[in-house]
Image (spheres, rainbow, N blue to C red):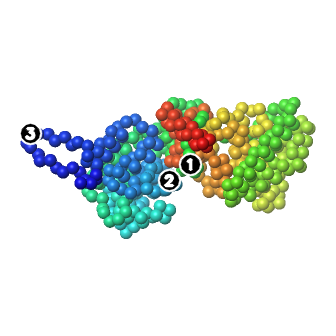
């Protein structure tokens, strides 16, 4: 008898109870799963371990865990075993799209011997799903509707049995309870929740997004800020020294970014050359210092220069000059913040930075404080943003729904760039696991 075969049935004697001892691989795996799922756990553990455990129970080569989020109509792969890790947070289906989306929409499991032959099949070429044609999607049901789906796939031609489907449907209820407990925010089922007031809080909240750079980090939330459009420009006796230092900091930071881009052999880094030219432009620096010497504050002097450049670009009707003017304005904003004694320019060290989008201004401003992660409320296809994220090399998540509704400066946040999640006020165990990962990475670098 192989290890996978269940033990032979013992004859049943009336009045005698049978103890189902360990040895039945499937029953053992089911009971182990139920015992594991009953314990309090981190959402990351749920996303990582559920697919692995279910794969062992139903002998599947691929198991994917999809969660319903966003507008309540988008299914996102948040957990998986069998496919590349890059699929997490990237594979997305609309409700009713594909076999999985259809199963969730009609709230019934769907199984098929050859997924590609099904009329509803939605291929993702990067997954090479043709390797695993045997397919079954089981909806995860919540109190008021679907929460997502468990999808299992196999090689070969052996279909998932009715018993497999029934068991997956039953076990998905434990996944449902864990997902609800995770406080996944900004879904259709949570629209009745009020926005949190600014100023921090203690509620454990999970904000879903799109993973950009893998890794996990913990830090205090810090929103990137730009100088006010109409600043009350206080003047200081050392304005010229402040401005000179700001130019030096910006120049060094840009050169560091250029060096790292060259090491990584990144494409699309030409804009950094433009910023390097602007930051080292002797005429720009001389004019800014002259205006300060004449009695203008740093913000007023740099704002005057940016406005003049923008007006000249508009007069010339040159797209090239208009782009250059925007770059100069971006750099001038960064110089204002770097030179200011305004608390707006300050940021806690090792912070999780939040912003709508990422620009060179943001990178220059945050470079002094060495952030540990980045969360953006928008998804951008801008080559600049992708280059900047890769240059920073920090865990990053984009398109974080409800970011500024729920996150406030000073909140503790766990940024999960593997699954595409921002966890506000994480548990002690979640924080401890990330710090242990960081220590292990440090040891591996030293060894």
Of residue 366 and residue 327, the one placed in the foreground of this image is: 366
- SS for tag 3? loop
Query: Which is more N-terminal, label 3 or label 2?
Result: 3
Where residue 18 sits, quadrant-wise, is top left
Q: Are marks 3 and 1 in contact (CB under 8 Å)?
A: no
Rendered residue at 55%/36% (across/down): 435
Q: Position of residue 287 (x, y in %)?
A: 89, 45
Label disc, if present, on residue 127 of the rendered structure: none
Where residue 441 sits, quadrant-wise, is top right
Residue holding disc 3:
15
Label disc, if present, on residue 85 of the rendered structure: 2
Residue 424 visible at all? no
Q: Position of residue 1 (x, y in %)?
A: 24, 54
Q: Nearer the viewer, mark 2 or mark 3?
A: 3
Label 1: how many residues lie within 10 Å, few (<14), some (14-19) or many (20+)?
A: some
Q: Are marks 2 and 3 in contact (CB under 8 Å)?
A: no
Query: Which is more N-terminal, label 1 or label 2?
Result: 2
- SS for tag 1? loop
Residue 131 visible at all? yes
Inter-mark Cα distance, 2 to 1: 9 Å
Q: Position of residue 322 (x, y in %)?
A: 77, 57
Residue holding disc 1:
214
Of residue 96 and residue 82, the one placed in the foreground of this image is: 82
Of residue 434 and residue 16, the one placed in the foreground of this image is: 16
For residue 371, side relative to residue 308 (left or right): left
């Amino acid at each position: 008898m192989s290890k996978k075969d269940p033990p032979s049935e013992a004859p049943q004697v009336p009045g005698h109870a049978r103890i189902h001892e360990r040895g039945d691989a499937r029953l053992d795996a089911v009971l182990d799963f139920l015992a594991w799922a009953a314990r309090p756990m981190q959402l990351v553990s749920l996303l990582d371990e559920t697919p692995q455990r279910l794969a062992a129970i139903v002998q599947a080569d691929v198991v994917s865990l999809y969660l319903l989020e966003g507008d309540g109509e988008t299914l996102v792969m948040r957990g998986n075993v069998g496919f590349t890790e890059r699929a997490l947070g990237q594979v997305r289906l609309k409700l009713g799209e594909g076999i999985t989306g259809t199963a969730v929409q009609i709230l019934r499991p769907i199984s098929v011997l050859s997924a590609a032959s099904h009329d509803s099949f939605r291929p993702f070429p990067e997954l090479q799903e043709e390797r695993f044609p045997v397919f079954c999607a089981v909806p995860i049901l919540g109190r008021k509707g679907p929460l997502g789906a468990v999808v299992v796939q196999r090689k070969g031609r052996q279909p998932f049995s009715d018993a497999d489907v029934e068991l997956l449907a039953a076990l998905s209820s434990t996944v449902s309870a864990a997902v609800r407990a995770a406080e996944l925010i900004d879904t259709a089922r949570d629209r009745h929740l009020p926005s949190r007031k600014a100023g921090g809080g203690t509620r454990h909240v999970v904000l879903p997004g799109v993973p950009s750079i893998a890794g996990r980090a913990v830090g205090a939330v810090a929103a990137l800020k730009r100088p006010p459009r109409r600043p009350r420009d206080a003047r200081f006796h050392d304005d010229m020294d402040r401005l000179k230092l700001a130019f030096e900091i910006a120049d060094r930071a840009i050169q560091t970014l250029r060096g790292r881009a060259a090491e990584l052999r990144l494409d699309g880094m030409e804009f950094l050359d433009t910023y390097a030219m602007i930051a080292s432009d002797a005429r720009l620096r001389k004019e800014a210092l002259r205006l300060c010497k004449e009695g203008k504050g740093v913000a007023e002097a740099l704002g005057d220069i940016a406005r003049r450049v923008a007006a000249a670009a508009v007069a010339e009707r040159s797209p090239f000059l208009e782009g250059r003017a925007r770059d100069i304005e971006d750099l001038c904003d960064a110089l204002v913040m770097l030179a200011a004694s305004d608390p707006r320019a300050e940021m806690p060290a090792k912070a999780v930075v939040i912003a709508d989008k990422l620009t060179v201004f943001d990178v220059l401003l945050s470079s002094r404080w060495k952030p540990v992660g980045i969360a953006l409320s928008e998804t951008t296809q801008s080559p600049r943003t992708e280059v900047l994220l890769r240059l920073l090399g920090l865990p990053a998540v984009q398109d974080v729904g409800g970011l500024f509704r729920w996150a406030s400066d000073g909140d503790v946040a766990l940024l999960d760039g593997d699954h595409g999640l921002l966890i506000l006020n994480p548990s002690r165990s979640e924080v401890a696991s990330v710090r242990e990962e960081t220590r292990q990475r440090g040891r591996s670098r030293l060894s």
